[in-house]
Image (spheres, rainbow, N blue to C red):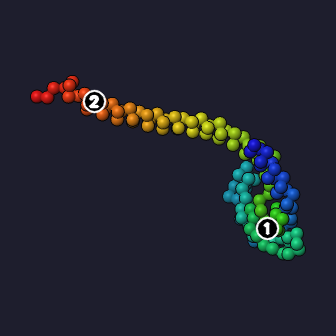
Amino acid sequence: AVYEGTTDSARARLEGGEHTTAVVLRHVPRHPEPGSEEERETRYPAAVRYTAADGSVRTATTEVEPGLAAGERVRVWTDASGEVVKPPPGEKEIRSRAVGAGISAGVGVPLLAWLVYAAGAGVVRRRRMEAWACEWERVAVRWTSRP
């Protein structure tokens, strides 16, 4: 269900948006570890200027690769109203979300069941102990001797 829902959502976003070329307005700092795996995955916020589908020139902030100079071009995803948004998730991200939801449900449902059981057992145990205490007070005078 999560896979199908996310796929449908991504498909709708694909139909309602488009890639647009934008120009970076200010220099983006370099990553502290050039050439590292982390640098390839890291994105920095940067101000960009782009032309929306309606022809208006707009500015926005989006995440870009580290080390870009002012004036360099980047691709951004815009929605139907021309606003810069995150691109729709790809197949790998959709599958990852679905697997994560499945694992969460697989762990969460039994955990929730155990918590409900433990809470119910605690209530029953407390009532049983209260009933036992009341009964003991009633019969204790016959079983204990007082000096």
The residue lying at 78 percent from left, 73 percent from top is 59
Neighbour class for label 2 at 10 Å: few (<14), some, many (≥20)?
few
Residue 83: image tag: 1
Q: Position of residue 41 (x, y in %)?
A: 73, 53
Secondary structure at badge 2 equals helix
Name the residue furthest top: 143
Camera sees residue 66: no
The residue lying at 72 percent from left, 56 percent from top is 42
Determine which quarter of the picture holds residue 83.
Answer: bottom right
The amino acid beneath tag 2 is Trp
Give whichever of discs 2 and 1 has the lower sequence position: 1
Q: Position of residue 97 (x, y in %)?
A: 72, 45
Between the residue at mark 2 and the residue at mark 1, the CA separation in whole angstroms equals 74 Å
Q: Position of residue 12 (x, y in %)?
A: 83, 55
The residue lying at 73 percent from left, 59 percent from top is 43
On the picture, is 77 further left or further right than 103?
right
The residue pinned by badge 2 equals 136
Q: Is residue 80 above or below residue 33?
A: below
